[in-house]
Image (cartoon, rainbow, N blue to C red):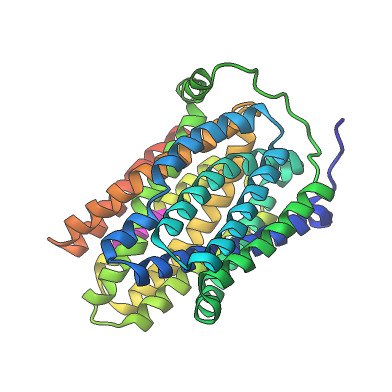
Amino acid sequence: MTTVAPPFHRDRAVHGWILLKAISDAGDAAWILAIAWSAVTAASPAIAGLVITAGTIPRAIALLVGGVLADRWDPRLLMIATTVARVGVLIATLVAINVSGETLPLLFAVAIAFGICDAIFEPSSTSLTRQLVREEDFAAIAGVGQTASRIGHMLGAASGGVLVAWGGLAAAAAANAVAYVGVIVYLVFVLRARYPRTPAPPEPMLRAIAGGFRYLRRDELARTLVLSLLGLNLCVSPAMSVGLALLVKYMGAGSATLGALEATFGVGAMVGALVFVRFKPTRPALVGFVLLVVQGLAVASFAIGIVPAAFATCAVIGLTAGAASTLLAALFMRTIAADGIGRVVSIQKLGDDGLMPAATAAFGAIAATSLPVTFVLFGGAMSVYMATTALRWRRR
């Protein structure tokens, strides 16, 4: 049965879900920090790196399977099941710490288990989001949701340091478990899909996974959105991670400047994400891709190499990232077929997970020769690609 959703600004059920999801994101950020800290204090940097990346391969497999399950089954029930599993992992972690302390096998097992749970949860979350609000409110839920999530991650990372200093990994596990219990209660008793969808027909798992790739091959706009989001992450993320740290060193500044630059980007992204909650352009694809052209030019402008210009650039990158992601996320939900969105999300995230380390390593390798040239290459490549994409979809 279809239930008509109220306008987003009056939708208390969705507002509550966004708030609770942000609290859960804060718990995740604190938990990830705790895992990383426990790993680096218990072993060598090489082993710590293995712990942090231990879930990569299982997560990749689980992403593809999770996309199929999200298209085939009730995404809300999948989210409940995976969240219950995460609470189980956290409780098992608390028991193991009490019995044998923070051991490396425990850290490896927890990293793998959480990677699998997250991979199944994420496609289902996008699928359910599409069923919660009216189509005209896709941008609103994307923008407000992204802003709340970003705030949650920032607060969680800050509180994670306090939790670890006070009670170690056990304190972070307990806090995250409490947040997840809140998510479970809300999903079970409050949140309901308002707009049912026709699920994907049952078929063998490998054929269903291949069906996601076939869908992208057939649908040009869907393929363009996935490639654009992938290109955005591969060009901007290395510049804003290792690139920004190298830039601060290049300018002769210190860690306080790095923190201020990252905060400038974060505030800009939150403001940008909220712009199109209220204002809805008639050609969202064109506006979104043009914003990404500007973002690529901003990345290239890091080559100027002076502190005031770097702050201005971080503000522009943040604003355009937030605004474009809101528009393109709404277009993504509106464009992708209801019985294929889980698999498309899983493919997009798999691309990010698989190619991001290579892109970051490539940025660092080129930057060893010339940092300004590296910014120009990455930013210029992004601008050229997004400009050609904007021209192709200028009427959408």
Q: Is residue 133 visible?
A: no
Residue furthest to the left in view is: 369
Tell me where residue 261 appears, x and y as whole percent: 40, 74
Which image quarter holds the N terminus? top right
Percent of width and height locating residue 288: 51, 47
Give the residue drawn at x 42%, y 65%.
Answer: 36
- At horizontal 50% and vertical 62% (from top left) the residue drawn is 319
330 versus 239 height, above or below: above
The residue sitting at 63% across, 33% down in the picture is: 70
List the single residue furthest toward the front.
99
The answer to whether residue 24 of the structure is visible from this angle is yes
Give whichever of 382, 84 is nearer the camera: 84
Number of numbered discs present? 0
Residue 179, image quadrant? bottom right
Relative to 157, 195 lies left or right: right
Q: Position of residue 373 (x, y in %)?
A: 19, 59
In the rendered view, would you say 346 is above or below 102? above
Residue nearer the viewer, 230 or 282: 230
From the viewer's perspective, is residue 223 above or below residue 265? above
Q: Position of residue 344 (x, y in %)?
A: 53, 33
Location of the C terminus by quadrant is top right
Could you tell whether 213 is left or right of 244 in the image? right
Find out whether residue 352 is within the magenta segment.
no
Q: Which residues are magenta?
A: 294-301
Query: What main secondary structure does the magenta stretch of the protein show?
Result: helix
Query: Does residue 296 show up magenta in the picture?
Result: yes
Task: Name the residue: 38% across, 67% down.
Answer: 313
Q: Is residue 366 left or right of residue 247?
A: left
